[in-house]
Amino acid sequence: MAVYNLKINGTRMEVDVDPSTPLLWVLRDHLKLVGTKYGCGIAQCGACTVHLGDTAMRSCSLPVSSVGNQEVTTIEGLSENGDHPVQKAWLEVDVPQCGYCQAGQIMSAAALLKSNPSPSDADIESAMNGNICRCGTYVRIKKAIKMAAEEQAS
Amino acid sequence: MTLVKTSIGRRSFIKSSALAGGGMVLGFSWLASCKDQAAMEAALAMPDEWFEINGFLKIGDNGLVTIMSPNPEIGQNVKTAMPMIVADELDTAWKDVIVEQAPLNTDIFTRQLAGGSQSIRQGWEGLRLAGATARQMLREAAAQAWGVAAAEITTSAGMLHHEASGKSAGYGEMASAAAALEVPEEVEMKDPKDFSIIGTDQKNVDGKKIVTGQPLFGLDVNRDGMLIAMIVHPPAFGMKLKSADTESVKSMPGIRDAFPIVVYPEGAERQWSDGGAIPEMVAIVGESTWQCMQAKKALQAEWEADGDLESTAYHEEALNKMLDTAQDAPARNDGNVEQAFARAAKVVESTYSAPYLAHNTMEPMNFFAHVTPEKAELLGPIQTPEFLENTLASVLQMPKEKIDIMMTRMGGGFGRRLYGTFAVEAAMISQKMQAPVKLVYTREDDMSQGTYRPSYKIRYKAGLDADGNLIAWHVRGAGTNDDLVFENRFPAGAVDNYRAEKHALPTDVTTGAWRAPRSNFIAGAEQAFMDEVAEAAGKDPIEFRLALFDRAISYPVGDPEKNDYDPERYAGVLKLVREKSNWEAGPPSGQSRGVAAYFCHNSYVAQVLDLTVEANAPKVHKVYCAVDCGIVINPLSAKNQVEGGIVDGIGHATYSALTFRDGRPEQTNFDKYRLIRNSEAPKSIETYFVDNGIDPTGLGEPSLPPVQGALANALYRATGNRYYEQPFFGERRIIG
Ligand code: FES
Ligand code: FES
């Protein structure tokens, strides 16, 4: 066990866990931030996507010991009132079905728009290919990302 | 307006003290559109008092209405749609509605089950009555207050009006008096043309919570003192636990206990929802998920054979053998197919197959349980809470009154959560631990302890006369644990000589319902074969099908009552998709086009799909989809269901397969089991609903089955190859 002082959603949080513990389980079990989801545990589905700095990361495969001083943003901290352009577009397009994969989808989309404010279809597809949606909401996801990009530009 | 006797669902209109207390407020329908904080806060103003009018709804003194959504929410969006139906008959404004998930309550609600795309169809009348009854009681209360006749009182958007006297009041003002009235014997229901909420686009009531990551799902449940439980189950179907060294994992960090557990003790009653149950396994209980995962990995256990250790090669061979064997007693036999084939100008014969599939809901199986000698509290994702209650009563030896089951929103169902053995496991572990536990399956547990979509094979043979008319159709299908063929579906009734045979191969690999059971394979096979037959007949594939429907309409073969489908509605969706896709003009240049139509879950779907084949994979540019599911409650989310089914259908037919070696699933996570991804989904989907005012039918499943046929048919036009084996572009790809 070891103590880690993490910077999550702008707040310092301390946990005492085994160094091998993935950030996902630190968030979910120890910090009760359950918006970040478990889907596969092997960086294949994207349900656990968070931002490390500005980069989308699969938190299930990121040991807490490697987070260090980097800023972690989870779905709970993406915006104060749920009004990030991506979240707004998600609601406008009514993307979710079961909703389980959507936190990860939104975090991937938000990271994409940060690095590429007006992504092409191909850019969207390659940035979002790591996020599985069993309900099949991909068509709406694409539409919502384009809507968010437009809103950000205006 | 129609007068309806309330006796149909009268027990639903008793009051429930359990619901009167308020419960958990799960979402404001309008929150999604709330722009500023002040408006949000103002609107959040809760009433001082709620008045329960009946088990489905209560009205606050300020006019807010809480509507219970009785059925489990698995992503099919009934949590928005079912309350919309109540609200419309109540004649309130949708913005004033709060939706709550109802707990299991068999005194009030009927069929609290998510399955067979039946929630809306079977709930329709009861939901309408619940709203209409409450509206009538509000009118009666106003009539008494104003000293006028109830018949003279009209309603609109949560207001009561009496034109002659100019009096009006909000529902909130009359709620208290209405709640004290007797349930009326007879109520007025709206004429569908007067619906004001049904048929409008309404956003998901949980939308805001979903996009902000609020705890909604079973896996998100957290309680004081809650422990995490995991299981280690036999690694292969046909194996059972021999011994496990639980002692050495008990000393691992954070582990509280580890023990073999018999989930279904001797004498425990099993029902269909316990399908797939593994009677004995090892439970590991600890403080955190990661610690349990480590102990799970470290556990040394021995397993022994308890049945056949089947491999995919065996399933294939045994199913093939069944297809080669004629059945003495066919499920349906019209005319004489043998004679017809003998005189046919052309005979076409093909065999289609598909592998096992795992459900792979994105949220793995899990359940919270707190079992004490006094009561059992269960909370989690389950499609069949009523059946779970029966099983729990038996395994826990506890009367049902002491068992409380509450459903969380589910991260997908697709049939997997019909089989609630994981909830039974959670309850047994909690009972043993005398502590609240949340049982969590890893993805590997989830994929390797499934109730899979069976593996299927089907052989079709068709005979055409010299003019290209279909004169004979012979289908023989076989599946693992499932006999596959629906003998009374199309083209039964449209062909003079028709024979349907079906076989089931009993196996140790557990199977169950998977989104659109059977249809999820047979539709694609049948519609691909129909395309081959139309081609052999030298006819346009849509014209060829329409001629068969004409036949089934004008002089059907056999008793038309026996046929599952209505040929007019079937033909209707084909004609609609023909028009919308501009079928005669053909696909955009360079693209190839396929068509298919299917009936299942009481609904009709036809699709036209345009694709190109690039880098040895289909690139689907567009899917046009025509749907006849009667009245559409919420077009915005209905289209989402249709789109999802199309993506899901294309994905599984193209990429997914679960194979076995010596009883072990060979794919246990998404590195080996392929699911469709963003770049592989259709670029665009256009959905059109037939507007016919017929009572609503299923929608969560029907768009999935036919798209596999439309895909296969478009692939044929693009490549010149027929695609007989699913997955078309997975590892098992074989081109005929
Ligand atoms: S849970 Fe991390 S990628 Fe699937
Ligand atoms: S919305 Fe259900 S998995 Fe994506």
Image (cartoon, grey):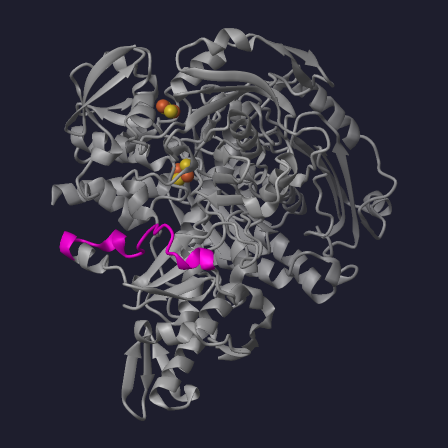
Q: Is residue B160 above or below residue B13?
A: below
Displayed quadrant of residue A37? top left
Residue at the far front in the pictured view: B374
Nearer the observer, B528 or B223: B223
Q: Is residue B482 above or below residue B530?
A: above
Nearer the observer, B10 or B647: B10
Displayed quadrant of residue A130? top left
Q: Is residue B189 above or below residue B563?
A: below
Residue at the far left in the pictured view: A154
Across and down, in percent, residue B375 comes to 53, 40
Res B629 visible: no
Displayed quadrant of residue B50? bottom left
Across and down, in percent, residue A102 comes to 34, 37
Across and down, in percent, residue B499 comes to 79, 46
Using residue B306 as the reference point, say whether residue B407 is left or right of it: left
Q: Specify whether residue B24 is painted magenta.
A: yes
Split into quadrants, the picture shows ligand 1 in the one at top left
Across and down, in percent, residue A44 comes to 39, 22
Using residue B194 as the reference point, say whether residue B413 is left or right of it: right
Res B358 visible: yes
Q: Specify whether residue B213 is painted magenta.
A: no
Residue name at image x 50 percent, y 39 percent: B378
Nearer the observer, B428 or B384: B428
What is the number of callouts on the image?
0
Magenta segment range? B17-38
Q: Is residue B406 above or below residue A75?
A: below
Residue name at image x 35 percent, y 50 percent: B26
The quarter of the rendered structure image containing the C terminus of chain B is top right
